Image (spheres, coloured by chain):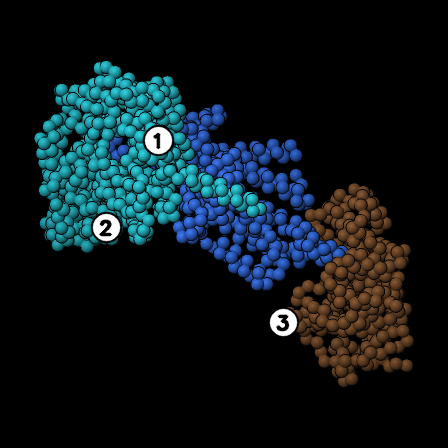
Chain colours: A brown, B blue, C cyan
Amino acid sequence: MALLEINNLKTYFFTRNGVVKSVDGIDFSIEKGEILGIVGESGAGKSITGFSILNLIDDPGKIVAGEIIFNGINLLTLSEEKLEKIRGNEISMVFQDPQTSLNPVISIGDQLIETILYHNKKVAKKDARKTCLDILKLVGMPAAEKRMGSYPHQLSGGMKQRVVIAMALLNNPKLLIADEPTTALDVTIQAQILYLMKKLSKDMNSSLILITHDIAVVSQLCDKIAVMYAGRIVEYGRKKDIIFNPMHPYTKGLVACLPKLNDENDRLYQIPGIMPSLLNLPEGCYFKNRCDYADEECNTYPEKKQIDKRILFCHKVKEN
Amino acid sequence: MAKYIFNRLFHSVLVMFTISFIVFFIMFKAGDPVELMLPIDATQQEVIEMKHALGLDQSFIIQYGKFLENVAQGNLGNSFRYGQPALDIVIERFPATLELSVLAMIFSIILGIPLGIISSLKPNSILSRVIMFFSLIGISVPVFWTGMILVLIFSVVFGVLPSSGRGEVFLFTSALTWDGIKHLIMPVITLSAFQLALILRLTRTGMMEVLLQDYIKLATAKGVPRRIIVYYHALKNTLIPLITVIGIQFGQLVAFTIITETIFAWPGTGKLIIDSIQNLDRPIVVAYLLCISVIFVAINFIVDVLYTFIDPRVRV
Amino acid sequence: MKKLLIVLAATALLSSVCFAKDLKIGIASGALAMDPYYQNETTTNSILSNIFDSLISFDKDIKTKPSLAVSWANPEPTVWILKLRKGVKFHNGNNFNADDVIFSFDRVKNWDKSGFKSTVAMIESFSKIDDFTVKFVTKKPFPILLRKLTYVGILDKETVEGKSNEWITLNPVGTGPYKLVTWRKGDLIKLTAYNDHWRGKPEIENVVFRPLTNNATRVAAILSGEVDIINRVPVVDVARVRRNDKLNFFVKPGLRLIFLQMDQFREDSPHIKSPTGKNPFLDVRVRKALFYGINEDAIVKYVMKDFAIPAAQFSPSVVFGYDPSIEREKYDPKKAKELLAEAGYPNGFEVQLDSPNNRYINDSQIAQAVAASLSKIGIKVTVNATPKSTFWAENRKLNTSFFLMGWASADGDASSILDAIVHSYDTVKGFGNRGRFSNAEVDALIDQSSAIMNPDERLKYLQKAQKIALTDLQCFIPLHYQVDLYAFGKTINFEPRTDSRIWVFDISTQ
């Protein structure tokens, strides 16, 4: 049984201007110990997917359909109380912007310790503190002891993100969801953090969902990749399939964006056009207006195709 | 820390000097108190004698100089009207005013913050709307109107609360006796209405803003119970601007006691200062304003120190 | 919890029972000091007159009667021998005798902060004849000495001598029917009965005076029954008080005259715009025109809500010097216009009317009404209403051409207003004569009257002075006498006094 199975998840936002279908019927799953990458442009629905798993959707958003089955239980049927027990415990999240992820008026130590204590009532504060220290060292925080008493504004971006990652790992979660964990960091730190996350997940045998717009990142780290576009998954499969043999025109475009060392072109490849507004989606395939291969067939939304171990939504690719 | 305190003290003394000078000057120019103390047909001789007895026939500089000399000895002069040391009169009346102000502030904090939080959690619920409606009334309705309506309803029509005066005093306060409490209820409500509404609204907007922040979302994602998120994670952040406002508002409270004290015949300094200004009783006006500035300076200092405890980004 | 409630209820009940015999009086202002010589101020005098006795006192209608002096003789015009009451003790048990009288008068005359110096100015000397006889010598024959003596409360020499001013103002020891228990400035004054008073045991055991300066607060207090008596019922609340069947409403004509004074000595008056370039007030016809041109009945009716008595002379009827033959002439705007035209002002003139706005009852409103009246006869009046502190300051500097003022003949004798306001301004008299009215004949009559000891004879002089000054020369424009309005519980027997003082000894309950 998969650790996490998402079936037909739909998360809509009911705004004054209309209904924004941020996530409009996606399916994927992740096994124990696996690293899944969800990749796509801004606005594709990746982060919302991550938030939906832990039901962190605020007004005017609402999860309107689907199942989120974690260890056999549909999280969407759980009460808030029960969900609180899972959050930060069996499933953790790391947010995008470390500058705003930590509470400015509570010390690092307190924010870490409380994560343990709220899930393990019987643990003594002293012991919890020790665990926090250990994890901080594990994530490579220099002078960890001192940092326990520090406040977020005293730490750099990279250090803050390490804290957030440490916080997510404290209770040995089975699943870690990382939403653009390195986007806000220096390029030099990025590699460190990513490598750290991969190592930790392997060491602890926890699964990792890595949400990012950066196809280069997923090409390095992930076991499976899901490509999202305008609220839907357009291609989904193993890394080697997706990266080395992309079939969906969008995926092809994304992969083509990767700069290659032996590239002789002066300009980087860009997929022409922009993603359509989620308030004003075209009839049929959402990508058709930017697609080199589109024709009248694409005026109806493509049906799901399975090619080997890959899922695909495109009229123009034939199952063979 | 010691340097900081010294700095603050120095500034405070400077502030008080400036205030005493300004007040002295204004009162000096405002008119002749002797006119108000003697009957119309007092002879010119009597006027001259009384002016001399009060030291009012000297130039401004000499009068101010004498004042400073006296201040150095802890003497703020005798009230023209009462003939007793001005500082004693002011200090005698201060506990009553402070009692009202402090209780009003406590009341508005104890009610305002929780109500503000409640109305921030579900901003469009009926309860929130009702709370906001009453807070609008609290902000808009003038103090004297509130006071008079309360007196009309509870004293005149229903006869359950005394319409004026301060109750039995025990250990400097009237809050420890039942009689005292009965007398405190309406003045405290009257005085705190505005503060309560203000604190309520500030807490609500503050909380609403804070609850949208990423760190709150992350705390939720960590599985911190909602109760803790609201009352600790969020509230702690909301408190920072709130404390500053409360500190400043305390000054306003003490100022507004003037009206409340007049309506409820509360024997505090508010009433004293109005009468003293009308009667050009300069020593009392100066003594009062100096005491007030001491209080302000102290409050601001306390607020600043409290700040550093709540907001770790600000350190002395 | 139930137990707590019972205890609380019992305490509340007990405390209400304990205060049952306390008479509570809500007054419009508080006392300034407990030193009877500190300031000559109405409320202070009123409260202190319960604690201190004077040699002579006034009855309800300001007639003199014996108090600490039981009899007096006036063997020579300037000599008065007073015999003192025997067996009187101060609140602390000390005996009252002539030494106390001498000490008291020495202090009231010579203490540099005494507010009563002018009251006793005519006393040249005072001496002890024996333990119960004192002799006063006046500078000139002074018919109203006894009236002046009512202002001087007698202090206990042994207690007060050598003490500081601050001590004296907080520790009153008198022979009066009440002793001070508590004085919380601005909050309350509690007095308790002095059972060995020479008038007998007071009926009311404890009385609490509560200064309730805000009008609405004072009215609320009487309506809710928290106080038993209030003075100065605001005119707007009279109807409500009358409707309350637990209360009595009482109107007592007072002593204060509200009048208008005009600049009568300067050609170039600061606030007049006159078409002739001259000061119109110098012409008696103009002054008379003002008198005929002000609709005082309307002022009494609409501004004072009928709570005022239109005046035609200096003093109300209880004051010695009153002339029953004088009646206020009717409002006659036509006649007023004729007089103005005759005087050379057919189209009137412009003038500023100065008035305080926080001193007399409805002072600035009266000024507005006067302005409205006068505009109908062509005189354009701008009202300048200011707080009393500003008003008096400008007034003393004579920076005024036309102003509203009040005067209470508190002595009960017309000489007070004549000396202060009607007499020419010189080194001795006329210090309140800010309009600087001056007439030699009137001055002579006033000066002579002050030395005539025979009351019938004296009355003639006073009345004649008034006739010339007011009826003939219109030295100022009398408007009305204020009345004092009281409200008190139906179970209270209270007869207000003309001098507005509240004597608790004379109050009883049914």
| Dot 2: chain letter | C
Q: CA distance from mark 2 to mark 1?
A: 38 Å
In the displayed orientation, state which residue is furthest to the bottom: A296
Task: Report the amino acid beneath label 3.
Answer: Asn
Measured from the top left, where is residue A148 in percent x and y?
78, 44
10 Å crowding of disc 3: few (<14), some (14-19), many (20+): few
Label 1 marks a residue whose chain is C
Evaluate whether label 1 is on the same chain as label 3: no
In the image, what residue occupies the spot 21% across and 34% down?
Answer: C62
Q: Amino acid at mark 2?
A: Asp
Q: Position of residue A142 (x, y in %)?
A: 82, 45
- Counting labels gives 3
Q: Are marks 1 and 3 in contact (CB under 8 Å)?
A: no
Circle 1 or circle 3, nearest the eye: 1
Q: Residues within 10 Å of mark 2 (few under 14, many from 20)?
A: some
Q: Which residue is mark 3?
A: A17
Identify the element where label 1 is drawn.
Answer: strand
Q: Where is residue A253 shown, x and y percent of the image? A: 81, 72
* Residue B228 higher or lower than C133, as above or below: below
For discs 3 and 2, the disc positioned in front in the rendered view: 2
Name the kind of residue labelled 1 in the image: Ala
Q: Is residue C152 left or right of residue B302?
A: left
Determine if residue B113 is in view. yes
Query: What residue sits 37% from the left and 46% below the top?
Result: C225
